[in-house]
Every structure is written in C-alpha cells, then in structure tokens.
Image (cartoon, grey):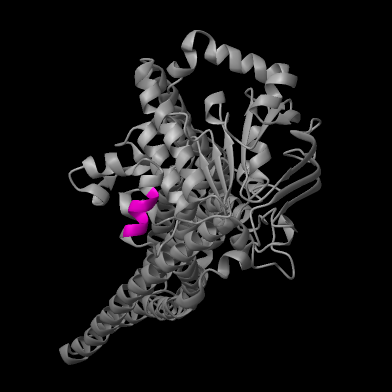
C-alpha cells in the first residue's frame, strides 16, 4: 500500500527531498541553540565582557534566523510536495475509475467514490505532509534533545527516565482508544454523501411529494452519527494536552528543585545555572516532540483507513480488457447473439438473460417491447460491451465484441438512454461529445434529424445556450432529443435508443423515426419502447419476457402469433388511447 501511494509523488520528489533536508538542518540548529545559551549564561556569570556577550548573541541571532528561514522554506516545499501528491493521487483514482466496467462501478457506490477522492485523499495528503515534515523533525528533536540533555546535565537528565515512558504509554493509550471511532467515521461519510446525492438529484421528486422534512431528518441523522464519532474520538485525543502539561510541569519542578539544590550544594561544580536553563529547554523540546509524535500517530492511523480505501480503487482491475491483438475496424452494423446467457454476478442464482439467439442484419430497424424487468436494457448493453456475456457470444460486424478494441467498438455503437445526461456547457459543446470535430452545419443537421433544431433556435442564444449540470434547464423531451442528436454525430454503425423517446409526443416520435429511415438507412437501429407505435413499423420486433425472447417478427406476424404483443397493442389503441400515450 505504501509503495502504491509513494508512486504518486512522481515529479514532486525534489520538493519532498528539499523539505527533508531543510527540516534536518532546522532540527540541528534548534538543538544547538540551548547549548550555546547555556554557555552564554555561564560566561555572563563568570563576568564575561560585553563584546564577548554580543559576539555569542550575534551567533545565536544568526542561528535563529537560519532556523526560521529553514522552517519557512520547508513549509513552502512541503506544501508544494503534499499538494502535488494529492493532485496526482486524485488523478490516478479518476483515471482508474474511468477504466471501470459497469461491473466494477456496481461494486462501489458513486457516493463512496466521491468520498474517496475528496475526504480520503485530504486525509492522506495531511499525513504525507506531516510525515515529510513533522515526522522527521520530531524524532530528531527527541533523540538530539535527550543526548544534549545528558551531555549538559548528566545525572539531572534522569528525570526523563521517569516522564518519557509515562508520556509514551499515555499517548499510545489515547491513540489506541481514539482509532476505532475515527475508522467508523468513513463508512458514515459514505452514507451521508449518498443522502446528499440522492436529495440533490431527486430534488423535484422530493419537493413534489413534500418530503423536505423527511430528507432533512435523514441527513441530520447521518450528520449526527458522524458528529458523535468525531466527538468521542476528539474527547479522547484531548487528553493529550493535560497529560503533556502534567509531564511538563513535573519536569520543570524536578529540574528547578533538584538542579537548584545540586547547584547550591556543589557550588556549581556538578550543575550550574546555564545547565539548568538548558535542561528546561531540552525538557520542553523532548515533551513537545513526543506530543507531536502522538498527533502524527493519530493522524497516520486515521489516514491508514483512508489509504486502504483509496488503494481498493487503485487496485481494482477493470472487468473488461482489450484483447492481445484487438480489431480496430467495425465492418458493418450486423449483430448476432449466439446461445447468450448472462448474469450480473457469478454468485447470482438467476440469469438476467437466458437462451438468446438472434441475428440482426446491418441497416435493419429492430423494436424491443417487454414489461419492467424483462431485461430489455440488459440485452442491448451487451452490444457495446458494457458487460461481457456469461456464456455464448455477441458479434458486431461479424466479429465477437470481445475481440474489438473497446474504443473502436463503442465508437461504432451509439446508445441513447431514457435518463441520459447532459453536462455543464453550451448545447454545442454537449453535442460535440458525439464528434469533437463536428462542424456547425453537421450539428444543425443532426438536431434537425432528432427534431431538436426548432426548440434550440427558439432559445435567445441558440446553440450557444448554456446547459446547467444534468440539463436541469431543459425539459425531459428536449434533453432526450439533444442526446439523440449527440449520438447521431458519432455516425454510428449501430444506434440504440433505450426508451429514449418516452418524453416526446407521438408525432415527434414518428418524425424522428421517419428521419432515421431517410437519412441513416445503413445504420442498424434498435429501439426499446413502451409504446407499440414507436416500434410498429420496425423490420423486426422482439417481445421480451423474464430475460428471454418470447416472440419475434414484424407487426403483422406478432399480431397473429403473440398473445403478449396483441394484448399490449389492444390496451394502447383501445378507444384511441394510442394518441394519448405521451410522456
């Protein structure tokens, strides 16, 4: 795990090493200053001349300035190194997530992934900063101070034999008690972020059902759980301060009482005033070093859970891989399902798709009908290889989809979902997701084909109209038509519409399908719909039930042989109901 995270330092190794060197120099100077001060005190007591005092004072001032400059420079290089490390870490996590198949995404909730890229990365960044700065300085100060205290005061330094073990034991106990509370917080962060995400995404539903108070209570409960855990942990960690003060005052009292007695009784031969002052300073440095080490221990232990969660993402391998020798050209839009069976997880008892045999010639229009849960969407998701089949094979253009380069395959297959997404940016920028090099004329032509040009031109800024995140400032039907236009700009071999005209009226739906027949006759069109009218004129209609193809044929054939299709048709057309089937 440490090697995995250390690899994210990369181009920031130099400021990291600079920080370490500066911290070492700062620690050495800070340890030497009390030694020189003690010598100065002794010289003054012995009647040193003012010139000698000023000379030593100048040395001390120079050392203090160098120490200050080292600390300041270390702060700058440390900030650069830690911020760069965090940037690389987020970059690596995002790139890894971007390679995930749906199977991998299903393993992590989106809220959990957001928490890992924000809170967890921030925790690891803080630990990295403390490691290259405080975690180097504190042990050095601790060791150097003990050595110098023994050199300066000999027997008087025995006080550390008592207070150091007490302080170390106490700090370890505090950290040990606080860690379980810190660890439990991260899972609760995930749940809180899920609550926020659901609330924001479903704001219209929340307001439509007047459930604001319920959502507030749900979020409040999640937030309160985090507060309780953090309060419990911080309450335990807060014991560090009184423990530190106890040891500090004990050390001061011991040095002053015992040191003064030794200085008086020995007339300065065993311990003098300078040594006592140095002992007080070194005692403070030793105890502060231990205090900082305890805080580092708490932070590192807490961030270890964050590091583990980050590495779970970084070590996750995509369920889909390019073959060793991929195919880089899709010949045509023909599609073949051969003995296909599929389930979402190896441990699943039931197949989502079972016994699927299907041949779709290139350029054909295929409609798919079926009830909720009949696996219509699952069937078409196998075509661009969003999932791999469990058994059998799916071929596009006569080649197994597992033999294609993934980008090549998905570039030849365009999918428009019922709940497709628009992104923050202009309409033109959103449409160019389909083809970054599309000309304005091609964009307008695609929108006309998708019946979107008319309403886009009605906006004051036309194609330069700004789309809010998620497309919240356009209607559902407008969003679907823009997504269809975006897919058309890919000039795909296969176009899949997964109930993507559910929010448009039947007349617009018919115009879109008429445009498909006229302008993209060589593209294979697969249309999943709830309305028979949307697929009635298709070359082939599939009727799905319980993950199987119950019937297939054109409209006339299915009216003759398929009871399911006939029932759907009669329900929708009885009493002119078909004309009323608008979203």
Horizontal side, residue 297 vs residue 265: left or right = right
Q: Residue 257 placed where, x, y %?
A: 39, 59
Toward which corner of the image does residue 51 lie, by quadrant?
bottom left
Q: Position of residue 201 (x, y in %)?
A: 41, 33
* Position of 436 relative to 72 (above/below): above
Q: Is residue 137 magenta?
A: no
Q: Nearer the viewer, residue 328 or 291?
A: 328
List x then y, in percent, for residue 263: 39, 70
Quarter of image, res 474:
top left
Write the residue at 74% across / 33% down: 352
Residue sitting nearer the eye, 36 or 496: 496
Is residue 301 among what the camera can see?
Answer: yes
Quadrant housing the C terminus: top left
Decide if residue 147 is in sight here: no
Q: Residue at x 37, y 58 (%)?
A: 442
- Residue 226 drawn above or below residue 521: above
> Which quadrant, please, contains the N terminus?
bottom right
Q: Is the magenta region chiefly helix, strand or loop?
A: helix
Residue 396 x %, y %: 69, 54
As drawn, 232 above or below 332? above
Q: Magenta segment range?
A: 441-446
Q: Residue at image x 57%, y 69%?
A: 6
Q: What is the residue that sits farthest to the top in this orientation?
A: 575
């Amino acid at each position: 795990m440490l090697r995995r995270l250390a690899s994210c330092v990369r181009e920031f190794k130099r400021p990291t090493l600079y920080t370490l060197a500066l911290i070492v120099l700062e620690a050495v100077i800070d340890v030497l200053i009390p030694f020189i001060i003690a010598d100065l005190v002794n010289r003054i007591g012995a009647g040193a001349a003012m010139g000698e005092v000023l000379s030593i004072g100048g040395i001390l001032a120079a050392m203090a300035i160098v120490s200050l400059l080292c600390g300041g420079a270390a702060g700058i290089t440390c900030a650069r190194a830690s911020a760069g490390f965090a940037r690389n870490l987020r970059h690596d996590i995002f790139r890894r997530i971007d390679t995930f198949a749906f199977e991998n995404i299903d393993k992590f909730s989106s809220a959990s992934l957001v928490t890992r890229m924000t809170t967890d990365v921030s925790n690891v960044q803080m630990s990295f900063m403390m490691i290259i700065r405080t975690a180097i300085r504190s042990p050095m100060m601790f060791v150097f101070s003990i050595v110098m205290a023994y050199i300066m005061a000999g027997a008087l330094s025995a006080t550390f034999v008592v207070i150091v073990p007490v302080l170390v034991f106490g700090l370890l106990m505090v950290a040990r008690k606080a860690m379980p509370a810190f660890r439990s917080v991260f899972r609760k962060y995930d749940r809180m972020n899920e609550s926020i995400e659901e609330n924001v995404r479903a704001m219209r539903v929340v307001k439509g059902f007047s459930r604001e108070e319920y959502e507030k209570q749900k979020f409040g409960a999640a937030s309160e759980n985090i507060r309780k855990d953090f309060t419990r942990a911080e309450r335990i960690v807060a014991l560090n301060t009184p423990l530190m003060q106890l040891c500090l005052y004990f050390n001061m009292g011991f040095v002053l009482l015992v040191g003064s007695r030794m200085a008086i009784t020995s007339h300065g031969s065993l311990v003098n005033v300078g040594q006592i002052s140095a002992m007080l300073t070194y005692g403070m440095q030793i105890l502060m070093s231990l205090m900082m080490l305890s805080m580092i221990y708490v932070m590192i232990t807490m961030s270890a859970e964050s590091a583990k969660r980050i590495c779970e993402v970084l070590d996750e391998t995509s369920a889909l891989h390019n073959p060793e020798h991929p195919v880089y050209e899709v010949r045509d839009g023909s599609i073949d399902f051969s003995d296909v069976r599929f389930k979402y997880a190896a441990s699943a008892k039931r197949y989502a798709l079972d016994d699927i045999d299907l041949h779709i010639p290139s350029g054909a229009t295929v409609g798919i009908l079926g009830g909720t849960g009949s696996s219509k969407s699952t069937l078409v998701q196998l075509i661009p290889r969003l999932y791999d089949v469990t058994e059998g094979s799916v071929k596009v253009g006569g080649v197994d989809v597992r033999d294609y380069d993934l980008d090549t395959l998905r570039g030849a297959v365009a999918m428009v979902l019922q709940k497709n997404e628009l992104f923050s940016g202009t309409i033109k920028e959103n449409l160019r997701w389909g083809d970054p090099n599309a000309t304005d004329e091609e964009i307008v032509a695609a929108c006309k084909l998708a019946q979107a040009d008319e309403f886009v031109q009605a906006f004051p800024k036309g194609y330069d109209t700004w789309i809010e995140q998620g497309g919240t400032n356009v209607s559902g039907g407008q969003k679907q038509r823009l997504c269809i236009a975006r897919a058309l700009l890919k000039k795909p071999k296969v176009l899949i519409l997964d109930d993507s005209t559910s929010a448009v009226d039947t007349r617009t739906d018919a115009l879109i399908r008429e445009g498909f027949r006229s302008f993209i006759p060589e593209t294979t069109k697969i249309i999943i719909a709830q309305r028979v009218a949307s697929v009635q004129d298709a070359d082939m209609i599939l009727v799905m039930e319980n993950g199987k193809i119950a019937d297939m044929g054109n409209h006339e054939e299915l009216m003759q042989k398929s009871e399911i299709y006939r029932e759907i048709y009669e329900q929708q057309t009885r009493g002119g109901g078909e004309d009323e089937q608008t979203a």
